[in-house]
Amino acid sequence: MKQTLYDILSVPQDATVEQIRAAYQHAMSELDSTAQHDHNKKVILREAYELLSTPQKRSSYDARLARQESLRSQASIAREQQATAPVTPTPAPARNWISVIALMAVLLAAAATWWSVKQKEERNRQQELPVYSEVTPASPVEPPLRAVVPAPPSQIAEPVASNNINAEAGKTAEEIYALRAPSIALIQVFSPIGTQVAIGSGVMIAPEVLITNCHVTRSGVQYKARIGKQLLAATVIMADEEYDLCRLSVPGANAPVVALGSTDNLRIGQKVFAIGAPLGLDLTISDGIVSALRPLSTGKVIQTTAPISPGSSGGGLFDAYGKLVGINTFQHKLGQNLNFAVPADWINTMSTRRASNQSVGAITMNSLEGNREGNRDSNRDGNSQASTAQQAATKILGLWNCYGVLTGYSMDVLFERDSRLSGTMNGKKFSGNYLFDGKSMSLSIGARISGIVEEFTDNKLVVNPGKADRMVCNRR
């Protein structure tokens, strides 16, 4: 008897979506723990999970199983009747001819029924994942655009590459959400004293590993990821500021891993879906099209009309087949619906490094995610630089809590008039002087600390001293 998708996942046919998801995650975990596992088995498990977790496709598949079971039952009954039917001798020639004609009629009817069943199975095999028990060898590279091809009855067909953009109709927004929302996280960022200072989004790209933007994590030193009903501690394990991509380790996370796509298969005008936490509203989906593929020194970034907002950074951009093609990263606030995602291709080429001058990281770290009021003011009128510096010097007055993102030091600083400051660090008091014009800052408190102002608002200040660390200040 042929193996069904329920057999592949080891679940009963009346299993719930939660039971199917748990069985899929268990099977994938067992494969990952095998030293030399078969890549094709992962593909089969993923396809079985995607079909059985989508109500419309599962209903169609169950109906096909029921039809096949009905045909098998009818064939079995016919064989039993034929085996038990009494044989009556007919010595007369007339009766012999009648028996021959009746036998031919039965054989013709059986042949017609067999041909009809085979044709119907062939059509179903081309439309859905076949219900077979073995694996067809395939290329180790899984393409984002797939076409299911017929396979011999003893094998399970695996998706193969297709250059035809219309090879599949694609999934609906409802199907994309059901498939990928369980893999999206809301990321909360906290200061050393436990105050939440930022939020963002993340995507599960490997077991217990999230991908997000570095400009989400850089504002704090402690992180939590909310994935479904789980709220888990997270730590940064790799920061590639050149790509503005950071990997987070989230021990205990049991969310499904997404499949990665590639910009090589994207075309301008194709449908895409963004899932993230705009303004903290987690698991929000929006759709749009690929507006353009913009070249940078590090590669192409995706311009899209799928709406995003602050908080969406680090969320997933998916194609019409559910493949992760990009990480939503920034938007141009002076235009309309100008949203950008870095390509998912970069995830597999990440390394720990600082941002160069022409990289995505240089763009997002300096201007395009938060309100950069000091920078905008200085660019509006070249003749108002002195006025802007004076406004910045006035706006910074007051008590702030500042900390080093990597070093973890924390201090309370009171910025006073006449460029004087005082405060406490590790229980010890200090005083000194400072220079601040909205673009750069210099502190003299025994040692000298200076750097470029990356962000300055009424309640937040981020200074880059030119090292791996950053000083982040929040108004008290």
Image (cartoon, rainbow, N blue to C red):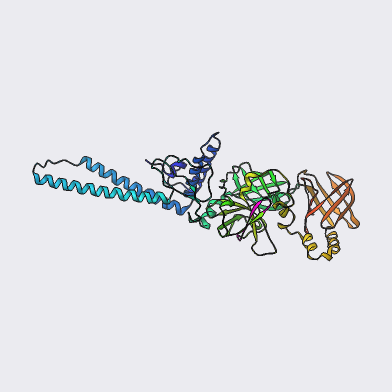
| Left or right: residue 127 compared with residue 446 | left
The picture places residue 71, in percent across and down from the top left corner, at 32, 47
Q: Residue 353 vs residue 93: left or right?
A: right
Q: Which residue lies furthest to the left in this view?
A: 92
Which residue is outermost to the right?
418
Q: Where is residue 46 in the image (x, y as percent from the top left)?
A: 50, 45
Residue 413 located within the stretch drawn in magenta: no
> How many discs appear?
0
Residue depicted at 84% across the width and 58% down the height = 437
- For this view, does 56 lie left or right of residue 222? left
- Could you tell me residue 434's position as x and y percent? 88, 53
Quadrant in the picture for the N terminus: top left
Residue sitting nearer the eye, 314 or 359: 359
Q: Does the magenta stretch include residue 304?
A: yes
Q: Can residue 200 be seen in this view?
A: yes
As rendered, which of 314 and 13 lies closer to the eye?
A: 314
Magenta residue span = 296-306
Q: Residue 181: in sight, yes or no?
A: no
| Magenta span main SS | strand
Residue sitting nearer the eye, 248 or 96 = 96
Residue 264 vertical position relative to residue 373 in the rendered view, above or below: above
Residue 182 place in picture, x, y as percent: 56, 50
**At x 31% / y 45%, what residue is drawn?**
73
For the C terminus, the quadrant is: bottom right
